[in-house]
Amino acid sequence: MPDYGQTLRFGSFLTPTAADATVVDLAVRSERAGLDLVTIQDHPYQPRFLDAWTLLTWIAAKTDTVTISPNVANLPLRGPAILARSAASLDRLSGGRIELGLGAGSFWDAIAANGGPRRSAGESVDALVDAITVIRALWSDERGAARVSGEHYSVDGAKRGPAPLHDIGIWLGAYGKRMLAVTGRYADGWLPSSFNAGPDALGAMTERVDAAAQEAGRDPAAIRRLYNISGTFTDSADGSFLNGPPRVWAEQLADMALLHGTGTFILGSDSADDLERFAGEVAPQVRDLVDAERNAT
């Protein structure tokens, strides 16, 4: 698979535990360590977790430079019109630092228990396409009211705005064939996780995203390739993915950038030490290895 030449970025994927303010401290430490983005999982039905949008707003107020995003926003319990205005509002307040990770939904029993819809896999994908259309319509600077007629989400004469401060990217957490095709046709970024799709699975999935993009007349390189990762820092490597010293992590992630076009790596960890090692030791080595390979070709 090609190297899309994307600027490498590194981030954290934090657990929004409600019991204490650790997640806020980890977000601040992520920025201070030099990471480029901070992301938060969104499970609105989980009482052990802080509400994602409230937390993202608090983190935005406590930081200055990092990009902030849900990883990924729960569409069925939030709805596209609210998501559009929430993201645009926080983007304006934060100085243009918001991106929108978006998911079709899962854990349908919990969603239904909290008043949301219960959707089949096919319905959830259709609803996601409707939602993307609604969100972009409300962000648009076109004149006149927004009108989108979808099977699951519609707006009929909704006033547009507020407009985000910058062009917010919509990043989809996608794995199945239809979701990968939707990513290629409509999304600004693709955000799978190594704990759901290991590196060996990415090649075939990338081909589906790229084929759908090309069929839609889009340049596949315009779709940012992100990857949630997890691993363990150890003194010696055992050959598995991200289990070893920082140099081994760097070599494996550089291979992913060059072979699969992955441009953003987001470490799922609530360990400040691991996040700081990732930012201070792994990220610079990945950049050096990728730059050397790109400059040699």
Image (spheres, grey):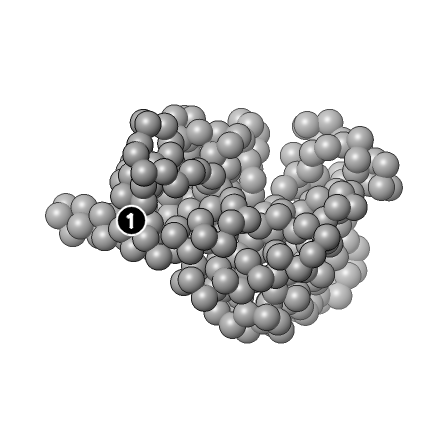
- Pick the front one: 171 or 53: 53
Packing grade of label 1 (10 A; few <14, some 14-19, many >=20) is many
State left or right for residue 259 relative to residue 172: left
In the displayed structure, 201 sits above or below 104; it is above
Q: Which residue is mark 1?
A: 286
- In the image, what residue type sits under mark 1? Val
- Pick the front one: 113 or 26: 26
State left or right for residue 4 relative to residue 22: left
Q: Dividing the picture into quarters, in which one does residue 209 lie?
A: top left
| Residue lying furthest left | 296
- The spot of residue 35 in percent (x, y) is 43, 59
- The spot of residue 269 in percent (x, y) is 52, 46
At a point 17% along the width and 50% down the height, the residue shown is 292
- The spot of residue 72 in percent (x, y) is 61, 46
Q: Is residue 150 visible?
A: no
Q: Secondary structure at mark 1?
A: helix
State left or right for residue 228 relative to residue 45: left
At a point 48% along the width and 29% down the height, the residue shown is 197
Q: Dividing the picture into quarters, in which one does residue 52 lie?
A: bottom right
